[in-house]
Image (cartoon, rainbow, N blue to C red):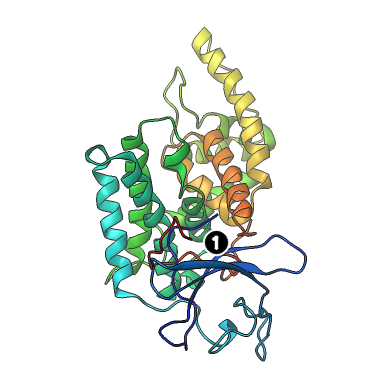
Amino acid sequence: MPRRSVICELTEHGPEQHAGLIRPLARPEGGAVWATWTTPEEVVCLALYDCGRRGEGQERPCYLFGAHPGPCSCDRDALVEDPARAARIDAALAVLAAADQHDKSAVQSAAHDATLLTWDELRARQIWRSLPACGQAAMYRLLARADSLRATRASVASTASELAADVAKMTRLWGPSSPPRLPDGETAAALLDALDRLPLEWRTLVLGGQREHRYQARMPLEEAVAWASRHSSEGLAPPPAEDDWTAEWDRKEDERRGATTSERLATLPYGWRVDAVRRIALGEDALGTVAAAALSINVIRGYGVDRASSDPEPTSLHLTSVQANPQKA
């Protein structure tokens, strides 16, 4: 993904030696495209081999380019705190919140900055490493949506509002009295564990009932899981549908969509599964949520983040904060 925001990755260098990572190259010998500049208006892009040096006791090699000035990335934190970064995130969120008052290009740029810079801030503040797997999956999902407003045909204002709400939840993690994780994560993990213990026919029925456009109101996920757990522990099979055509249609659709949802949910990495259950419990359509998670994993892989699960820290893509000239970069 060619980024529209880059930061100088070098710690020790002269004023005319700025270099920022644009994207890794998908080739056996490695390497990446780097932007070099003296001013943001004079950007030159170069394909350079990786440094690759490993520090003592370090599992990951230096991601900088060969013969770079200053210490290797394995000898320091790749990102440092930048007071301007949080302000830029707030400005981008303000644009997204008032999307109907801005032109589409401004809203697109705000979506890009809000998502990518939030990830930078989490890493710079050393929050990323301590986030549980479901929190990291939620952030990866936002990264996959960084350019969502470029392709969507839905209402830009509505999509921007949803994106801003999700990003805002992430930004609360670095507040003065911030919680160590996103809300509802522990509850979602317990719900996922309970779902996994259900017999397949009960799990299918529960997940199928968590969909939009039911004739009958859907039971909240936590309540549905408790109901299914209680009856299945007694060895009971799911009860038949009520003697009504709408109930019968709902039951058949629940079973059909529930089987697909259960199968796809099982293929997701653990953190992504917990995040999906958290979203379903908050009212999102079950099958749509699981499908979006799988799509997000593929999107970030295409961008160079080969992280289906949540590793301690991503190394293959660095999304950063100093604005460079996108036309020249």
x, y (%) of residue 155?
A: 36, 31
x, y (%) of residue 229?
A: 57, 40
Q: Nearer the viewer, residue 299 or 219?
A: 299
**Image quarter of residue 325:** bottom left
Residue at image position (56%, 34%) is: 287
| Image quarter of the N terminus | bottom right
Q: Nearer the viewer, residue 272 or 222?
A: 272
Question: Left of 221 or right of it: where is 171?
Answer: left
Q: Residues within 10 Å of mark 1 (few under 14, many from 20)?
A: many
Extreme residue in the front direction: 42
Extreme residue in the bottom direction: 56
Q: Is residue 261 above or below residue 114?
A: above
Q: Nearer the viewer, residue 113 or 195?
A: 113
**How many numbered tags mark residues here?**
1
Residue 229 visible? The answer is: no
Question: Left of 43 or right of it: where is 266?
Answer: right
Mark 1, secondary structure of its residue: helix
x, y (%) of residue 286?
A: 53, 36
Residue with the mark numbered 1? 133
Residue 309 visible? The answer is: yes
Residue at image position (43%, 30%) is: 153
x, y (%) of residue 72?
A: 58, 85
- The amino acid at mark 1 is Ala
Q: Is residue 116 above or below residue 263?
A: below
